[in-house]
Image (spheres, coloured by chain):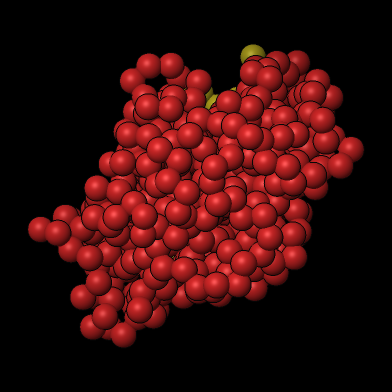
Chain colours: A red, B yellow
Amino acid sequence: MNRRVVITAAAAITPIGHRKDDILDSLTNGVSGVKPLREDKLLSGHLHSKVFGTVDYDIPFDFKRKYRKTMGPVAYYACQVAKEVIEQSGLPTDFVTSGRLGVSFGSIHGSPTVQRGIYECFFSDSDETYTSINAVDYLKSMVHTTAVNITKMFGITGRVIASSTACTTSSQCVGFGYETIKFGLQDAMLCGGADEYDTTTVAVFDNLLACSTDFNDTPHLTPRPFDDRRDGLVVGEGAGAVMLEEYEFARKRGAEILGEVIGFSCNNNGGDMILPNAQGVTDAIRLGIDSAKVPAGSVDLVSAHATATKMGDVVEAQAIRKTFGDAPRVVGLKGYMGHTMAACGAIETVLVLFMMQAGIIAPTLNLEEIDPRCGGLRHVTELIESPFSTAVVQNFAFGGVNTTLFIKRFD
Amino acid sequence: MTREEIQASILAVFAEAFEIENPELDDDLREVHEFDSIDAIELLAEIEKLLKSELTQDEKKQAMGIRTINQICDYVESLAAVRLKPA
């Protein structure tokens, strides 16, 4: 079985906006979502990096308590984008609950805010902690909390995939969802990822000297993918989701088709857990090209992982050169919002779809002087108003996991 | 703690913690108000706060068959009586 898979809805909560119009407005006007790190009374005072890709606008969550009671902040984000893609797709309730729709959704480690509450009780002198850790805390902080809060809220009874592979979490979720439909295991998959505001993640990268610190007083100037002055990544928050459907099913019900997923790859570097690996990334891209069955030269746009770390961007640029040559345009969308961790693959997929629909390619924000080691590529440094047909979203994660997701405009 | 005080406290907990306003005292909470096992565990925590005392595992297990506000009040009343009993 080898079925076509199309995208019938897309939604994102990002540091540069929530709705499509707001996000496109930020992309076309060079608006950054990176803000000063908030005081958290725990870690923020100790961190060298003082910036964060922040969702600082109100989101009108409208969830009943019976759903809220098992949700940490990350699940709020997840359920909101899930709600939006279900509504946007127009899938009827009887299909949503039929078992033919599955969920493929993840976060890097459940809700760190809830986990912090659990840990606090260990260090509390209070004797009023009778039941300080309970089942609800687990349901809010378990690693598949986003996926199963979505299934609960919408009565989804199909397969559940809850990838949790750090920065490739949601790109895997979309990719595994694609394969699940392609091979006939489900007719539709709600796919994506989310992560909430969390300084412990910043601390991890800060201690690895991988966070941006030179722009603490000018947050909007960092991160700087592929730029000569880049000094590390910026952690961010947000969520992204897409509804994937089998093509004939979507066509017959008259769904609006936003794009087609034509290929996916996932591999591992087979070695170091942290250092970027040129061979692993190159192999992942080649596997993706094979999966998509398109000539490498026909890919119009590479949405690079491009976290703006010193070595990661160089390795990725080399891999792009080696596999695609200098044909595709290259954009690093993290320049706008930092690294939204588990959500980044899904968010970047949604943003690529939005740009594909609008016929624009946003420039890599803060890319002013291309690092020569990242050169030889068609970096997008100013807004391009031009339709494009085929794009690849690349993501790489701690643990040596690499993914590529190939998307085609649907004509 | 009188029965009236217990009932008022439990109804306040239902309004504030569970967003269930003015339930009938003999409503089946599961059937009528979608009160589930997670809520039941949270309710036990609220009862511990009310009694300012930790419940034993046996006491918690006794609560598993409870379905109505009246039964909850009976349960709390019995727990309170044990805790107030002179040694």
Which sits in the foreground, A357 or B54?
A: A357
| x, y percent for residue A23 | 65, 65
Count of numbered marks: 0
Q: Residue at x 66, y 35 (%)?
A: A371
Q: Is residue A213 above or below residue B21?
A: above
Q: Is residue A206 visible to us here?
A: yes
- Quadrant holding the N terminus of chain A: bottom left
What residue is rendered at 55% in x and 51% in y? Answer: A378
- Residue at point 73%, 18% (across, down): A124
Is residue A140 depicted above or below A278 in this figure? below
Question: What percent of the width, then of the height, locates residue A224?
Answer: 70, 41
Q: Position of residue B67 (x, y in %)?
A: 43, 53
Quarter where residue A281 is shown:
top left
Q: Nearer the viewer, residue A326 or A309?
A: A326
Left/right placement of residue A44 relative to residue A344 reads right
Residue A7 x, y percent position in the rendering: 37, 67
Question: Is residue A106 at least partly visible in the picture?
Answer: no
| Residue ranking furthest to the right | A217
Left or right of A66? Residue A365 is right
Front one among A206 and A218: A218
Along the line of sight, which residue is nearer the eye, A397 or A252?
A: A397
Residue at left offset 39%, top offset 80%: A256
Q: Is residue A118 left or right of residue A98?
A: right
In what quadrant of the picture does the C terminus of chain A appear? bottom left
